[in-house]
Image (tube, rainbow, N blue to C red):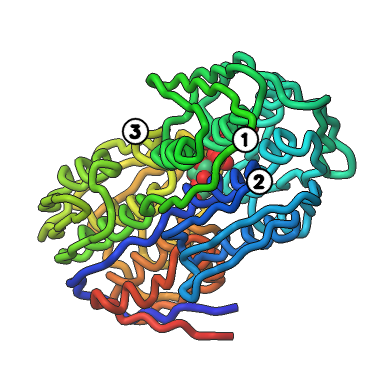
Amino acid sequence: MDKFLIDGPSKIKGKVSISGSKNASLPILAATLLFDLPVTLHNLPRVKDISTMLNLLKSLGSKIELSKDKKTAKISNNKNMKTFASYSLVKTMRGSILVLGPLVAKYHKSKTSLPGGCLIGARPVNYHLSALEKLGMNYEIKDGYILAKSFGKLKGGLIRFPKITVGATENSIIAACLAKGKTVLRNCAVEPEIKDLTNFLNSAGAKINWKGRTCTINGVSSLNSTNYSVMADRIEAGTFCVAATLAKGTLEINNLDPKIINTELNLLKKTGAKIKVSKNKIHINGPEKIKSIKNIKTNEFPGIPTDLQAQLMVLMCKAKGKSSITENIFENRFMHVAELQRLGANITTKNNKAYIEGNTKFIGAEVMSSDLRASVALVLAASVAQGKSVINRIYHLDRGYEKIENKLKNIGVKIKRLKR
Ligand code: EPZ
C-alpha cells in the first residue's frame, strides 16, 4: 500500500488545473446503460472510482474505448447486456448502486449487490428503493442482493423524497427518462453534479426540467447518441482553495466555473483569504492570520459541502481562536480528528459537532487515512506541519483525486509517493 512522505512546512505558490468531477462522472456513466447508441464522454477524472465504474459497465456488457490519456471514453452497449452487478465490484464503491435504476428502466430486471457498510455513516439505500418502487419496480433483498424487476416499462409517477439525497435523486432521474409518461420528483437534491447529469441526458434527447427542488421528467422511448464533457470537480477545487488559505499561499486555480463554489469562496473570504474570480479561473491569496469561524455547518447544496468538512477543519486548527464544525449529512464523519490530534491538533467532538482550538502548530508525524476526504485533510495538515509526515493508506485518496502529489509538487509542497 502506497504512502505519502511530506516534508513541511510548504510555501504554496503557482497554478493548478482542476480535473473532471468524480461525483458527476459516476451517475453519468451509470446512465449510459440507458442507451442503444454510442455515447462519448470527455473530461473524465483519472481516479480509481471511475475505473471501478468502467469495469462494472464492462461486466454488464458495455464496450469501452478509452483515449490514450484515459479522459475520454466511448461507450457502446449491445443487445445482450447483463443485469448482474456483483458484490465484488459494488463493495469497492457504493456509487455502483446507481446502475440499479437504469438496468430496471432499460432491461426490466437487475440483480444488484447492496453496497454494504461505510465508515462515514450507515448510508442505507432505502430512498433509492422506495423511489424506484413508485415507478413500478418490484424487488426483494436476498443474500445481500437486490433482486429487482418490472413488468415491462417503468411508469411515471409522483415521488417526494423524505430526505434530500443525492444518490436517490440521481437514480430516479435516470430511471424516469425511459419510463412511460411523466414523473415528478419533489424535495430533490440540487447539487451541481445532478444538473450536469441532467444536461448530459437532455443532450441525448431526454426531457428533464427543474424548478427549485422539483424535477419533472417526461419519459422518452429511447435516447440519441451524444458527446458530452463532464463538469470540473468542485470538491477538488475547494480543497486547493483551502490549501492556499492554510499556507498563506498564492494560487491560480483553472478549469472551473467559480460560481459553483460560491458558498465555499465566501466562507474562505471570511477567514481572510483574498479571492478574485474570472471566467473559469480563481485567484486566491491566503491571509497572514486566518480568522476563525464560530460555527461552520455542513448542508446540502448550496450549503457547505460535507466533502469539504475535513479540509475546513484543518484550516480552523490554524485559525486564530476557537471554532466549531457541525456535520449534518453523515453521522460518523470525524474519523480524521484522531489523526489530526497526532499532528498536534486540539479538537474535541460531541455527537455531530467538533470543537476546534485554533493556533495549532502542526508537527510532522505518521498518520492513517480512513476515507477519501479525511485522507486529503491529513495531506493538507502535513503540508503546513513542521518536519516530516507519513500518510498511510493513500489508496483512499486515489479514489477521488487525480495525481494529487504531482499537482501539489507543482505548487511547492515537498511530497513523495512511497510505492509499496
Ligand atoms: C453523494 O453520496 C456523494 N457521492 C458523496 O461524496 C457526498 O458526500 C454526498 O452525496 C452528500 O453530498 C457521490 O456522488 C458518488 P446522499 P450519496 O444520498 O449519494 C442518507 C465523496 O467524498 N440516505 O445525499 O450516498 C445518507 O445515509 C462522497 O466524494 C438514506 O438514509 O449521499 C446520508 O446521511 C462521500 N437513505 C444522507 O442521506 C438513502 O436511500 C445523504 O446521502 C440515501 C441516503
SS under mark 2: loop
Locate residue 369 relative to residue 144 in the image: left or right. left
SS under mark 1: loop
Observer-nearest residue: 369 or 107? 107
Question: From mark 2 to mark 1, how far is it between C-alphas?
Answer: 8 Å
Residue in the image at 11% along x and 51% along y: 276
Question: From mark 3 to mark 2, how far is it between C-alphas?
Answer: 35 Å
The disc at residue 222 is 1
| Marked residue nearer the N-terminal end (2 or 1) | 2
Locate residue 138 relative to residue 363 in the image: left or right. right
Query: Is residue 289 placed above or below 362 in the rendered structure?
Result: above
| Label 1 Cα crowd, 10 Å radius (few <14 / some 14-19 / many 20+) | some
The disc at residue 36 is 2
Residue in the image at 24% along x and 74% along y: 411
Task: Tell me residue 367's x, y (percent).
Answer: 49, 70
SS under mark 3: loop
Observer-nearest residue: 227 or 20? 227
Name which residue type carries label 1: Ser
Quarter of the picture holding the C terminus: bottom right
Question: From mark 1 to mark 3, how far is it between C-alphas?
Answer: 33 Å
Quarter-of-image position of residue 140: top right
Residue in the image at 79% along x and 46% along y: 83
Name which residue type carries label 3: Pro
Which residue is label 3 attached to?
302
Quarter-of-image position of residue 182: top right
Name which residue type carries label 2: Asp
Mark nearest the camera among 3 and 2 is: 2
| Label 2 Cα crowd, 10 Å radius (few <14 / some 14-19 / many 20+) | some
